[in-house]
Image (cartoon, coloured by chain):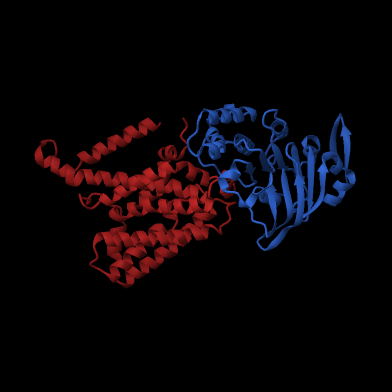
Chain colours: A red, B blue
Amino acid sequence: MRIWLVLFLTLLIGASLGIGVADLSGGGTDAGLLLAISRWPRTAAALLAGAGLALAGVVVQLTVQNRLVEPGLTGTPEAAMIGLLGITIVSPGAPILLKMGAAAMAALVGTLGFLALAHHVPRRDPVLLPLVGLVYGGILGAAALWGAWVTDLLQYLGAWTAGEFSGVLRGRYELLWIVAGLGLLLWCVADRITILGLGEAQARSLGLDYCQTSRSVSGSFRSPWRWSWSPSGRCPSSVSWCPTSCRAGAVTTFAPIWG
Amino acid sequence: MIEIENLRVERDGTPVLHDLSLSLPSGGITALIGPNGAGKSTLLLAMAGLVSPMAGRVRLDGCDLHAMRPQARALRLAFLGQDQAQASRLTVRDLVGFGRWPHHRGRPGPADQAAVAGALSLFGLNELAERPVSSLSGGQRQRSQIAMAHAQATPLVLLDEPLSALDPRYAREVMEALVAMSHDAVAPRSVVVVLHDLGMATRYADRVVALKQGHLAASGPRREVMRDRVLSDLFDTGLKLREVEGADVVLPA
């Protein structure tokens, strides 16, 4: 099954590199330049954003020990919207990196709020936590929309939160490589993350420093999601399906490596 | 050897264990029995160092359990609680393999794989080894968790109601596996297990600790504790111990 997924992904990468207004069939310098400036950055951005979402999905599920939760249900995108809106109101001409940073920091605070809430939600009913996340995200989203409406930035916010890769060019996506680095880091601590998912008592009885690991992992999982969000927009559809559909691949990452 | 001195534990501001003192020698199976809310699970958690007492201490072979580093503690005791999180998409082999994590910290060797294979075999999980834990029945999952605790290979094993989801056949097999663990000729282990099935406690335990409303009601060898009067007082209902076809069973009086 996994080999077919890899082949399918390779096919999609090929399609992404090949499809566009300009014809690359002639080859030459122009084709190479087009690939380097537009097609490859676009494809790499989509790949890295997808990988970030998948990693974030698995980690958030293990952290809160709930398979129904995914980063889009933790108030993270809505909090990022508030951050983006805030920086735009305070400093409309701020460089894109500053805006991304503000969105990322706000997403961090928003997710911390969700985790604080999750701590008090009974674990017996797995549906309860995603519902709490939905309501929490809804409240943050409403605040963001209200702020955008009052400041006449609704359209601007909409443009930022719509998934869009076609406009990604060289120089505007490189921050996404942070996701690759974080992915590598998460791979190194995959066994600890999986143990975290076994529950606090079990994790502690296996000798894991639960609080420290939980804090570190929570910070890490937010990172790929935040960086995925910022340069390419929110990608509503991929937020909801990526953690689920990428599960097979991501599980490989978080399964123990024997031998 | 576990020594508990004047242990007082509160959960959410409510006293659960009141100045409890207890000493358990190494080896054998100790059954923790008592009515609902007696503090059995809390005592087990305290013995695992997973709840901090308001007063008193728990010593394991002379060392204060709460002063131990988590990794050192994980090499000396394995704990299996009642509320097990869904082990996501791990296979049974992977889950049992995590029992070896305190030993290899992410770098498993042949000895770890052998221990996992042994645990799978002992708990009859060979056929399920490659199946995701999430696809198993409650009883199969329970056995996988117990196998993980076994694979941890610690001198002390603490199990909270391990038979709760098992049918009679597997309940008996698990208890027999625990007996085998506790009487292993090479590395005998002390097993402390919370049991609601008094018949199992009567049949398999070497010692019994009875708790009632957070106080120690009785403690000692099985034959001293599992008596009509003690059990009836413990559960506030008439109970009697009778021998049926060579085995002790607990019946309503």
Residue at x 25% of width, y 60% of height? A96
**Residue A219 higher or lower than B60, as above or below:** below
Judged from this view, the residue extending furthest toward the front is: B62
Q: Viewed as shown, does residue A192 lie left or right of B160? A: left
Numbered label tally = 0
Q: Between A5 and A61, which is closer to the camera in this rendering?
A: A61
Q: Viewed as shown, does residue A140 lie left or right of B202? A: left
Q: Between B31 and B130, which is closer to the camera in this rendering?
A: B31
Q: Quadrant of the N terminus of chain B?
A: top right
Q: Report which quarter residue A147 is drawn in.
A: bottom left
Q: Position of residue A53 (x, y in %)?
A: 38, 48
**Residue A203 higher or lower than B14, as above or below:** above
Q: Position of residue B8 (x, y in %)?
A: 72, 58
Q: Viewed as shown, does residue B187 lie left or right of A254? A: right
Q: Quadrant of the C terminus of chain B?
A: top right
Q: Report which quarter residue B190 is drawn in.
A: top right
**Residue B7 higher or lower than B243, as above or below:** below
Residue at x 33% of width, y 53% of height? A227
Q: Position of residue B89 (x, y in %)?
A: 50, 39
The answer to whether residue B130 is visible is: yes
Judged from this view, the residue extending furthest toward the bottom is: A150
The answer to whether residue A234 is visible is: no
Q: Viewed as shown, does residue A137 lie left or right of B44? A: left
Q: Report which quarter residue A160 is drawn in.
A: bottom left
Q: Position of residue A70 (x, y in %)?
A: 44, 50
